Image: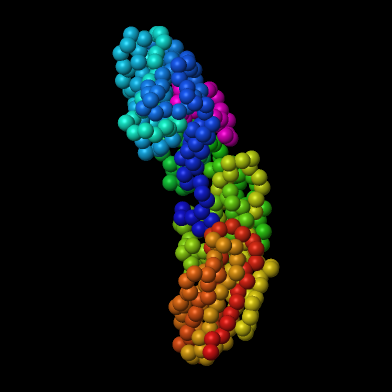
């Protein structure tokens, strides 16, 4: 379903979580390091051509797996890591994960050497991080956050699923059915699978933000505020609205950790009208419409709300500044301003920076006017030149960004 309302920043959440973790490691580790025996965990320091290679020891057991993530402060630098067996031979990795983690199966029991090599001959001093881990099977799990994962590690959980259950797998790498089949998304919602049978499902997580959830029961709504229950990351709740053909419906929220998508009850997405990035929808039929609210929080889930509204009508106005203190999130504003043919006028809005609403002007017969916007100011004027005499409609449509503050619309007639 196409996203309307606001689009969350969470489509790359796993990448951001790993990047933040790595940045903390690269800035917090003591330097220089090496020369110690490591176990599963995080290690770091400084490396250059002068102290390369930095070497750690690792006591391994034949047949066990080992994951080694090697990161440098200059992300574009080619990393070079070697695992040297107790007998002196270099062990070849069996797999590389995400371009920076080498995975090994240890050929013998004994003390291995982990050698971090500086990649070239420049004179830079770079901070490095080494993450040592083994894949784990942590046993049964329930719905909710799955727990911490080392960079480069795969952690398996077991979930007792029910046939037909729709399971949200936010940032979960794989869901494997009891017969070993890897399940793909069901096409209804992003990162949601439909479980084919009742049984034990293997849930494989590769980062610390993974969450399992079921959708919450639908909520019937009308115009006004709709209170929503707390939503886990990736969890959905449908808000159902009985709309009328031609109805202009505003949909908005003040929650930055909530993503909204608007569509028909049959999942067909609905595009904002007239703005492609606005919060106003002209309903194409008398029917029940579905607003899908999806949780995106990285903290403790909290209750939130969304609003359904009609345009806020300010009526016929002359020149001046018109505030909208009663505007609710997602609500558009309509003014009517009489001008003669050729009688140019200009319009601007005052509102929070970065969330400028869109302005649409139409003439008495519905003719759309194209305005000329000045460059430079944060609250620029847009000038319109009417081609017909009469009352012109000024429609101000807020963007998808959250916010319930007033929008001030200013009109000025030009000589």
The residue at the point 56 percent across, 45 percent down is 296
Render colour scheme: rainbow
The residue at the point 56 percent across, 42 percent down is 233
Q: Nearer the viewer, residue 373 or 407?
A: 373
Q: Which residues are magenta?
A: 129-151
Q: What is the x, y in percent for residue 159?
A: 52, 29
Number of numbered discs on residues: 0
Location of residue 186 with respect to 341 vertically, above or below:
above
The residue at the point 62 percent across, 84 percent down is 318
Q: What is the x, y in percent for residue 402?
A: 59, 57
Q: Nearer the viewer, residue 21 or 126?
A: 126
Q: What is the x, y in percent for residue 406?
A: 65, 67
Q: Is residue 182 visible?
A: no
Q: Nearer the viewer, residue 316 or 371?
A: 371
Question: Is 143 within the magenta?
Answer: yes
Location of residue 330 with respect to 130 vertically, above or below:
below
Question: Is 169 within the magenta?
Answer: no
Q: Which quadrant of the view contains residue 46?
A: top left
The residue at the point 50 percent across, 58 percent down is 4
Hey, which residue is sitting farthest right in the picture? 326
Q: What is the x, y in percent for residue 180?
A: 40, 27
Location of residue 125 with respect to 33 vertically, above or below:
below
Q: Is residue 350 visible?
A: yes
Relative to residue 223, is residue 132 drawn left or right? Answer: left
Location of residue 383 with respect to 133 vertically, above or below:
below
């Amino acid at each position: 379903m196409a996203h309307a309302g606001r689009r969350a920043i969470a489509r790359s959440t796993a990448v951001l979580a790993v990047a933040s973790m790595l940045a903390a490691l690269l800035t917090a580790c003591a330097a220089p390091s090496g020369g110690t025996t490591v176990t599963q965990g995080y290690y770091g320091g400084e490396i250059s051509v002068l102290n390369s290679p930095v070497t750690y020891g690792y006591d391994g057991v034949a047949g066990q797996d080992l994951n080694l993530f090697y990161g440098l402060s200059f992300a574009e630098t080619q990393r070079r890591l070697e695992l040297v067996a107790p007998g002196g031979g270099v062990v070849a990795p069996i797999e590389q994960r995400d371009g920076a983690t080498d995975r090994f199966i240890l050929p013998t029991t004994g003390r291995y050497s982990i050698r971090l090599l500086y990649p070239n001959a420049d004179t830079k001093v770079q901070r490095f991080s080494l993450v040592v881990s083994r894949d784990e099977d942590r046993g049964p799990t329930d719905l909710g956050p799955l727990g911490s994962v080392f960079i480069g590690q795969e952690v398996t959980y077991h979930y007792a699923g029910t046939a037909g259950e729709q399971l949200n797998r936010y940032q979960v790498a794989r869901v494997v059915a009891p017969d070993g089949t890897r399940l793909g998304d069901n096409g209804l919602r992003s990162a949601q699978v439909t479980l084919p049978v009742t049984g034990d499902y293997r849930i494989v997580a590769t980062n610390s933000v993974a969450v399992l959830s079921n959708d919450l029961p639908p909520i019937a709504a009308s115009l006004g505020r709709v209170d929503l229950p707390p939503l886990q990351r990736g969890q959905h709740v449908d808000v159902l609205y009985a709309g009328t053909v031609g109805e202009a419906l505003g949909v908005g929220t003040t929650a930055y950790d909530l993503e909204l998508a608007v569509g028909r009850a049959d999942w067909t997405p609905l595009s904002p009208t007239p703005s492609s990035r606005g919060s106003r929808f002209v309903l194409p039929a008398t029917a029940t419409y579905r607003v899908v609210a999806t949780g995106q929080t990285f903290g403790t889930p909290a209750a939130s709300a969304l609003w359904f509204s009609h345009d806020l009508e300010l009526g016929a106005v002359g020149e001046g500044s018109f505030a909208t203190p009663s505007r609710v999130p997602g609500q558009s504003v309509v003014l009517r301003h009489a001008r003669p043919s050729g009688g140019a006028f200009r319009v601007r809005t005052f509102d929070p920076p970065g969330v400028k609403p869109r302005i649409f002007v139409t003439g008495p017969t519905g003719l759309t006017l194209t305005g000329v916007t000045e460059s430079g100011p944060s609250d620029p004027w847009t000038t319109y030149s009417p081609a017909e005499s009469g009352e012109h409609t000024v429609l101000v449509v807020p963007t998808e960004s959250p916010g319930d503050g007033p929008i001030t619309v200013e009109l000025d007639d030009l000589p």
